[in-house]
Image (cartoon, rainbow, N blue to C red):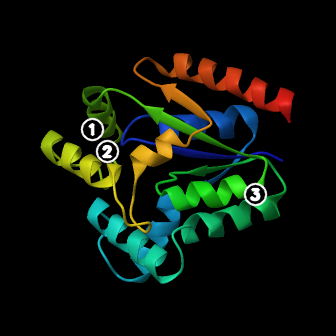
Amino acid sequence: MIIIGITGTLGAGKGTIVEYLVNENNFIHFSVRAFITKEIVARGMEINRDNMVVVANELRALHSPAYIVEQLYNQALASEKNCIIESIRTPGEVELLKQKGDFFLFAVDAKPEIRYQRIKLRGSETDFISYEVFLENEKREMNSDNPNKQNLKKCIAMADYFFENNGGISELQSKIMLVLKKIEKHG
């Protein structure tokens, strides 16, 4: 059983990696975003990026910096199948998962202009923002000394495998396939 976590910048291709692993490699997908969205709905709040950040940070502060990912990890473990946990955002989450064994962290990034165009095309409820707001959101999530808040820069630095994703989907899929072969060979 392999568990892969994905971290990366906004619009870099986390979802594309998930789709490839689920559709082509039979991984089961566990989403931090879906977990937080469920909590936002339960609280009767509007689904937007600001509320996602607030709710995630509150859950982490109340329980532990790795709380959300730990819940998803337990679900993944119960499945007894290869799984992917999407959207690792705090170093505490990475540290917890790396202690579990058979865990690999993938990080993905791309140029900001490319990523902004991708989120505009994706058009989810949190994507209807200007380029300036996009950059502000990212800046807010890149660094923090608070263990309960997002620190993408540090998570990306902690990754086992890094994917630069400025090209097309097939190029990214080829890179992922090579990494999966490495993981399977050493596993």
- The one nearer the camera, 116 or 91, is 91
Marks 2 & 3, CB-CB < 8 Å contact: no
When asked about the image quadrant of residue 40, the answer is bottom left
Task: Return the x and y of residue 107 as percentages of the image width and height.
Answer: 52, 37
Q: Helix, strand or loop at disc 1?
A: helix
The quarter of the image holding the C terminus is: top right
> Label for residue 120?
1
Q: Does the residue at mark 1 contact the one at mark 2 (Cβ under 8 Å)?
A: yes
Q: Mark 3: few, some, or many residues within 10 Å (few <14, many ≥20)? A: few
Sooner in the amino-acid sequence: mark 1 or mark 3? 3
Considering every residue shown, the one lying at the far front of the view is 145
Disc 2 residue type (three-letter): Gly
Q: Which secondary structure, mark 2?
A: loop
Q: Residue at x 27, y 35 (%)?
A: 116
Q: Specify the quadrant of the image occupied by residue 96.
A: bottom right
Q: Amino acid at mark 3?
A: Lys
3D distance between C-alphas at marks 1 and 2:
5 Å
The reply to whether dot 1 and dot 3 touch (C-beta < 8 Å) is no
Indicate the position of residue 145 as horizontal and vertical percent values.
Answer: 36, 61
Residue located at (16% from left, 39% from top)? 131
Circle 1 Cα neighbour tier, 10 Å, few/some/many (<14 / 14–19 / ≥20): some
Q: CA distance from mark 1 to mark 3?
A: 36 Å
Residue 24, above or below 49: above
Q: Amino acid at mark 1?
A: Lys
Mark toward the start of the polypeptide (2 vs 3): 3
Location of mark 3 (residue): 100
Looking at the image, residue 114 lies above or below residue 81? above
Task: Report which residue position mark 2 lands on.
Answer: 123
The answer to which of 3 and 151 lies nearer the viewer is 151
| Up/down of 152 relative to 64, above or below | above
Label count reads 3
